[in-house]
Image (tube, rainbow, N blue to C red):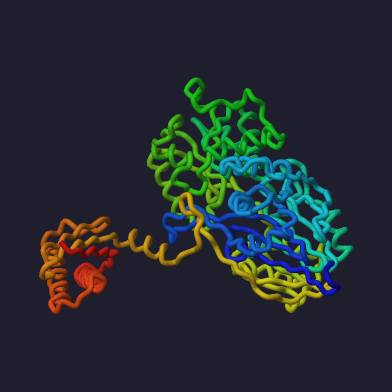
Amino acid sequence: MPKKDTPLKIIPLGGLDGIGKNMTVFEYGNDMVMVDAGLMFPDEDQPGIDLILPDYTYVLENEDKLRGIIITHGHEDHTGALPYLLQDLTHKVPIYSSKLTLGMIQGKLAEHNIKNPKFREVQDGSTITLGAFNITFFAMTHSIPAAFGVFMSTPAGTVMHTGDFKLDQTPIDGVRPNYGAINRFAAQGVDVLLSDSTNATRSGFTPSEAAVGPTLRHIIKNAPGRVFVASFSSHIHRLQQICDASTAVGRKVVVTGRSMVTNTKVARELGYLKIADENIIDAYDVDKIPDEKIVVMCTGSQGEPLSALARMANGEHKSLSIHEGDTVIISATPVPGNEKSVQSIINSLSKIGCEIYDKSKTLVHVSGHGSAEELKLMLAMVHPRYFMPVHGEAQHLRAHAKLAEQVGIPSKNIFILDNGDSLEVRHGKVRRGPSVDSGVVYVDGGTVTDANPVVLRDRQRLAQDGVVTCVVALSARNRSVEAVELTGRGVSYVSDEELMSSATEQVRSQVERLSSDGKGSIDSLRKGVRNSLSNFFWNKTHTRPMVIPVVMEV
């Protein structure tokens, strides 16, 4: 039985250093609940890395306390770490979310051969008890249906987590934010509010998702050839509008891209995406239908090199291709770090002769996150005693904190945390608690590994300056240099005979000097060769290739 002064701990393990890998732990006594388990995609400074996950070591160390995992909605930055977490847990933990979100998660778990997860479906207004936690789910509007916020009540205090949201009064599915529940919780008293900060730096209100529909319909109706629409595959509201616009003007819809095919299948089966069977055709059947009767929904809005849009733009797609006169709509905003990749695809499409529409040209995308006025409205409705901005980069969290001050929350009651920091709630009072182990782990091919800066530094050097291998053969009898062989990969001067000959002589003289007294060990010779060659190439070419020395006696 917890003591009277047992605190409610709020421990963010991810989501406070960028847009992605959201994961927050709530702990009271011997009970722990996790909200969201997301991933983040790597940027250009992380070559070879496939995915970035929050370090959830703290959860594994306290696994016996974990009563349940709550997923607020189906986006990758809230669900993507689940397969890896579930594989590391030694027992099955119930996962609570909407029917759509659980359907999307099911596909991810199947890819990792995780069978029979403990799914627990919840709806707007559902209340569950997990140990000392009494938790109520309430509907929020976002860029995906069935998004939730959660209200938690414990003996130590109450917390509201908004999840990702905007206050959309005309949502595509007609499900508005549950203002009644939000105001009811506010009347009950919210000790700590955790709220989405993504668009805290944007003034005004975020336009409704419904604002995109008329523009999409106009473009699709007037396009002379086929229309290709690239969007996030989980943006079901957007996909619904594309389908509605297509069928309204007599076009058939083709779906391509693995995640797009999977998510549209799940959303249709569960009733979240409505389009008649006769209006969806297989990609291999497009040649039987006139170009002006086709709309293709595809992945690739972020410039991913293996996405359907990228493969079609480069002529590498197995069943579809883009031709001069076709129209391409990029119905998304590039995630920070993806701008160059998106521009590269736009340039490839421009060379083909396509008509291209993106957010900079017309209203083909609106954000799924609330802007400053919506965030202030949420703060004013909830009127929390304490506030903790979440889900954003440092500038977003601080901008959200300023908005909270504007609506009357004292600055001393606003906590801007880093991943691994903690808050402790006791009897409605909040203070900072001790930090826990946190950080990131990388999915690198088939392995999940700690963030080793040496590995990334080596990869960056290989990408930037290449690698030179130097093999030195020493006589076992008198340690004289029998042969020196240099080879290079990713270096432009490997064919420069004069330079490589000088480098070979440099190595020969360095080895002879070090081994002349007979005391030079193989290790010291390797180090000498590496330093000598590294300095030589820097002086001659102003590059520092990775030097791999091999010294052996023959």
Front residue of this view, candidates 145 and 134: 134
Residue at 34 percent across and 63 percent down: it is 461
Left or right, 458 with respect to 358, comes to: left
On the image, the x and y values in percent for residue 485 come to 16, 60
On the image, the x and y values in percent for residue 23 come to 65, 59
Front residue of this view, candidates 270 and 119: 119
**Is residue 378 in view from this perspective?**
no
Looking at the rendering, which quadrant does residue 244 occupy? top right
Left or right, 67 with respect to 324, comes to: right
On the image, the x and y values in percent for residue 405 come to 74, 73
Q: Quadrant of the N terminus?
A: bottom right
Left or right, 76 with respect to 353, comes to: right
Looking at the rendering, which quadrant does residue 370 occupy? bottom right
**Is residue 130 in view from this perspective?**
yes
Q: Quadrant of the C terminus?
A: bottom left
Looking at the rendering, which quadrant does residue 198 occupy? bottom right
Q: Residue furthest front?
A: 477
Front residue of this view, candidates 177 and 328: 177
In the image, residue 143 sits, relative to residue 396, either above or below, namely: above
Residue at 14 percent across and 79 percent down: it is 517
Q: Residue furthest top?
A: 288
